[in-house]
Amino acid sequence: MSSEISVLLADDHSLVRKGFRRMLEDEAGIRVVGEAQDGSEAIRLAQELKPQVIVMDMAMPGLNGMQASIEILKVLPKTAILILSMYSEENYVRNALKAGARGYILKNAADIDLASAVKKVAAGQQVIGPGLISSTPGDYDESEEKLTAREKQVLQLIAEGKSNKEIAALLELSVNTVSVHRANIMEALGIHRTAELVLYAVRKGLVQLP
């Protein structure tokens, strides 16, 4: 059995994937087994290739890195997911960790050591980029805990401007089920307009603005 760490790269920019692939394959003990260009492809390839580590871009079209992570970990709970992000806000980091990611580093950090981060998460360690998260949790908001993981996914996609039909296709649900989730979210949060849902999601770091 190979002792190499198998890695799946997920990023919507092919040049970025090539650069990261080179960084990882220059390191002994790491093998890149596949590349995905969006969240849906990352889910499919993860199930097909069963990599030990997935290096996942946070902001991708369709399902973003956080949403893809939730879906992958339902099926492959032992997979180590390392989020690469342009977003340094603490809310984004905490939401990624809540989604099950084992690491979160900035993709534009000057001193990024991707191979070392991959090896650490593969060994079960948590890797957080320097200065990204405070030692004390941010203000606790129990309203967020009223939502299920699926409802948070639907909320994120609503906030990204996707229709019920588009959300249904991305999450492989019926349009009616998405409508029920939308109603439940509004009820749980006491919010009754889509614009207010978007503001809530942005404030909580559940959605990334371009």
Image: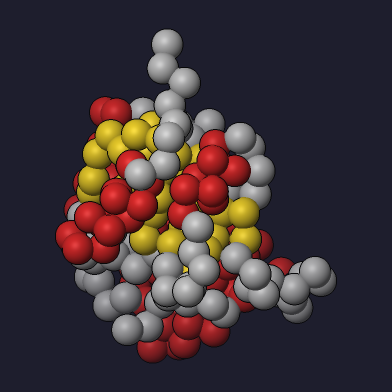
Using the image as rendered, state which of residue 93 and residue 167 is in the foreground. Answer: 93
Structure colour scheme? secondary structure
Which residue is at 29% across, 29% downward? 49
How many callouts does the rendering have? 0
The N terminus, quarter of image = top left
Q: Please give the name of the residue rendered at 54% of the width and 77% of the height, measured from the top-left corner.
A: 88
Provide residue 100's location: percent of width, then percent of height: 56, 48
- Where residue 24 sits: x, y (%)? 37, 46
Q: Is residue 127 left or right of residue 183?
A: right
Query: Can the viewer see residue 99?
Result: no
Tell me which corner region of the image, top left, top right, bottom left or bottom right, holds residue 34.
Answer: top left
Where residue 209 sits, quadrant-wise, is bottom left
Q: At which x and y percent is residue 98?
A: 60, 56
Where in the figure is residue 81, as x and y percent of width and height? 48, 46
From the viewer's perspective, is residue 5 above or below residue 141? above
Q: Is residue 25 visible?
A: yes
Residue at left offset 32%, top offset 84%: 210
- Is 26 placed left or right of 121 in the picture? left
